[in-house]
Image: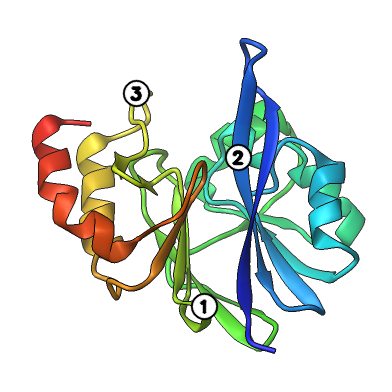
Amino acid sequence: MPVTVERHEIVGRAPDGGPFPNNTYLVGDEREVLVVDPAHDADAVRSCVAGRTVVGLVLTHGHWDHVGPAAELAAGWGVVPLLHPADRFLWEQTHPGVPTGDLADGQVIEVAGAEVTVAHTPGHTPGACSFLVPDAATVLTGDTLFPGGPGATRWDYSDFDQVISSIRERLVTLDPAWTVGPGHGDPTTVGTEAPEVDAWESRGW
């Protein structure tokens, strides 16, 4: 069975108490999966995994809504959460003292006979990464690229010029037919977003 990318929307609570939906992705097949950005609710993520073997748990970046139950889930599955070291400071805000493994640009993770390649795509956060799944013609972009623009860069550790460079140099160079799986909301395609990058850069957000 070919590798697939499953999108599961998991709804948590924002700091103001309102609903806060995130996308958790499972890359794999009916036997084993790689979990990407387990969000909000450990039981909900386990339900999505549905008893399959978890070969790894990777994080696009360190923000609270993408990493909430990661430590608990990783311990139960016998894996180590993988995060780019530049975002370790964000992980420490929610999981102080809990170890992670390091993601590196160009790193390859194997699951279900397929390869997932890590692309360091900073800007939203210093350690933001995207995950390329060629066998499924999909890139998982976290909060780097959404339909209609880049992720927010309102924090002092964020950089708008950098996120635009990441999108321009690492993401919209992919095949236009590839699916873009963002950290929140519906998917899009590389071909849909690529023509708009200049306009996003001009508007400044």
Task: Check the image and report above or below for 189 versus 126.
Answer: below
Q: Residue 25's x, y, as percent?
A: 63, 57
- Tell me if 140 is positioned left or right of 10 in this view: left
Q: Quadrant of the C terminus?
A: top left
Q: CA distance from mark 2 to mark 1?
A: 21 Å
| Residue hosting label 1 | 136
- Tell me if 121 is positioned left or right of 85 in this view: left
- Tell me if 107 is positioned left or right of 73 in this view: left
Q: Residue at x 85, y 70 (%)?
A: 52
Task: Check the image and report above or below for 135 versus 202.
Answer: below
- Tell me if 205 is positioned left or right of 100 in this view: left
Q: Residue at x 42, y 39 (%)?
A: 125
The disc at residue 181 is none
| Residue hosting label 3 | 154
Q: Amino acid at mark 2?
A: Asn
| Residue hosting label 2 | 22
Q: Amino acid at mark 3?
A: Arg
Q: Residue at x 59, y 58 (%)?
A: 102
Q: Amino acid at mark 1?
A: Ala
